[in-house]
Amino acid sequence: MIKTEALRWFCKRFINSVIMAEAKVKYRTFAKYLSTVMENNKIIPIASDHGGFEMKQYLIGKLEEAGYEVSDYGTHSSASVDYPDMIHPLATAIEKGEYPLGIILCGSGNGAQMTANHHHGVRAALCWNVELARLARCHNDANILALPGRFISNELAWDMVQTFLNTGFEGGRHKKRVEKIEPSEE
C-alpha cells in the first residue's frame, strides 16, 4: 500500500509541476506510461448507482480474490442515487490517465455508459455477454466496461469483467477507426 501511495504522490507532483505546463501530446505520452504502471499494480476503479450496487459488491469481492486492488467510487448502499454522481468521477480519472481500465454499472448500463462517454478519451462499452466484452477491448479499445446490473447474472458479469481485463487491443485496421472516435481539435 505504501508503494501505491508513493506512486500516487509522485504522479500528482509530476503532473502538477511538469505536465500541466507541457503540450497535450506529452501529457498523453505520460498518461500512457502511467496507465502501464497502474495496470501492473492491478488497480481497478469501479462505480455504480443503486441499480448496480449489489453486482458491484459481488465484483469487488471477486476482483480482490483475483489479486486486484479496487478503487470504489460508490455508491455505498442500495439507496436511490443519481448515476452521474458516481460515474463522472471515475470517467474523469480514466480521462486523466489515472487508471487504464474501469468498470461502471447501473440498472440497464445505458445511463452509466452515456455519462462516461462524455469524457475525452473515454470509450465506455455497454456489454451484455462475454463476446461483446472481448470485442469492445480488441476492436474498439474500450477502456470502461458498462454493465446492466438488473439484466445479467453476477456470474456472467464476472466472466465479462475477466474477459475485458485480460483482452488487449488488436490495433491494425481497428486503430484508425478508434482514432476517429475522438473529435478533431480543429
Image (tube, grey):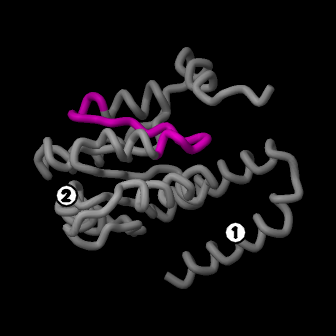
Q: CA distance from mark 1 to mark 2?
A: 31 Å
- Residue holding disc 2: 55
Asked if the stretch drawn in magenta spans residue 129, the answer is yes
**Lower sequence index among marks 1 and 2:** 1
Measured as percent of width and height from the top left, residue 124 is found at: 43, 39
Asked if the stretch drawn in magenta spans residue 1, the answer is no
Measured as percent of width and height from the top left, residue 168 is found at: 45, 37
Seen in the image, is 70 located left or right of residue 130? right
Seen in the image, is 85 located left or right of residue 178? left
Q: Residue at x 81, y 58 (%)?
A: 19
On screen, 100 above or below 178? below
Identity of the amino acid at label 1? Cys
Q: Nearer the viewer, residue 92 or 136?
A: 92
Q: Classify mark 2: helix, strand or loop.
A: helix
The stretch in magenta equals 116-132
Find residue 76 and report its image quarter.
bottom left
Find residue 11 and report its image quarter.
bottom right
Label 2: how many Cα within 10 Å (few below 14, some 14–19, many 20+): many
On screen, 109 above or below 86? above
Seen in the image, is 31 located left or right of residue 144? right
Q: Residue at x 63, y 73 (%)?
A: 7
On screen, 185 above or below 156? above
Q: Residue at x 15, y 47 (%)?
A: 150
Pick out the residue farthest to the top.
Answer: 173
Seen in the image, is 30 located left or right of residue 163? right
- Residue holding disc 1: 11
